[in-house]
Image (spheres, rainbow, N blue to C red):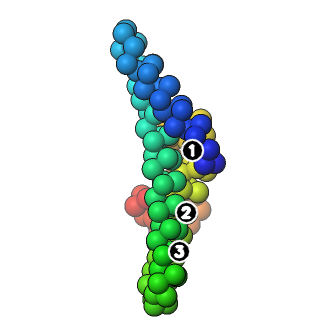
Amino acid sequence: MFDIDAKEKEIASLTEISQQEGFWDNPKDGEVLLKKQALIKTAIESYYKIQEGLEDLKVLAELEASQEELDKQISLVEKWIEAEELRSTLSGEGDNLGALLKINSGAGGTESNDWSGML
């Protein structure tokens, strides 16, 4: 999930490609490349953010910070990790695309009709 060296090399490669002459001759390809680059940058930034949070937690523990401060930092790092897990789970092909959802009320009378209308 966090092969940072490979991701940083890929960013460098994509940046080099995007700076080539004629890159924007095909705007759709350029857009795809830039989106891919942005996703990789987000993953790298998330990795460093989590690493920094863990280092901060280590320093707090070494300084014998209060349990409240430790709990706060742990919660923050857990939140970042959960966000990265979700991003990672939804990073497959097509996961960034929209979806069309149709809700029908079915059996249930007026209340289900109203409820499906609200949704």
- x and y percentages locating residue 51 in the rendered image: 52, 60
Q: Secondary structure at mark 3?
A: helix
4 over 15 or under it: above or below: below
Q: N-terminal of the two: label 3 or label 2?
A: 3
- Label 1 amino acid? Ile
Task: Say which residue label 1 marks.
Answer: 4
Quarter of the image for the C terminus: give it.
Answer: bottom left
14 over 5 or under it: above or below: above
In this rendering, the count of numbered labels is 3
Task: Say which residue label 2 marks.
Answer: 81
Asked if disc 1 and disc 2 are in contact, CB closer than 8 Å, the reply is no
Confirm whether residue 112 shows in the render. Answer: no
- x and y percentages locating residue 55 in the rendered image: 50, 68
- Label 3 amino acid? Lys
Instruction: Report the front residue among 105 and 42.
Output: 42
Question: Mark 1 against mark 2, which lies toward the viewer?
Answer: 1
Q: CA distance from mark 1 to mark 3?
A: 22 Å
Q: Residues within 10 Å of mark 3 (few under 14, many from 20)?
A: some
Task: Say which residue label 3 marks.
Answer: 58
Q: CA distance from mark 3 to mark 2?
A: 16 Å
Q: CA distance from mark 1 to mark 2?
A: 16 Å
Q: Residues within 10 Å of mark 2 (few under 14, many from 20)?
A: some
Question: Mark 1 against mark 3, which lies toward the viewer?
Answer: 3
Q: Residues within 10 Å of mark 1 (few under 14, many from 20)?
A: some
Q: N-terminal of the two: label 1 or label 3?
A: 1
Residue 24, picture quadrant: top left
- Residue drawn 51% across the image and 37% down it: 8
54 over 61 or under it: above or below: above
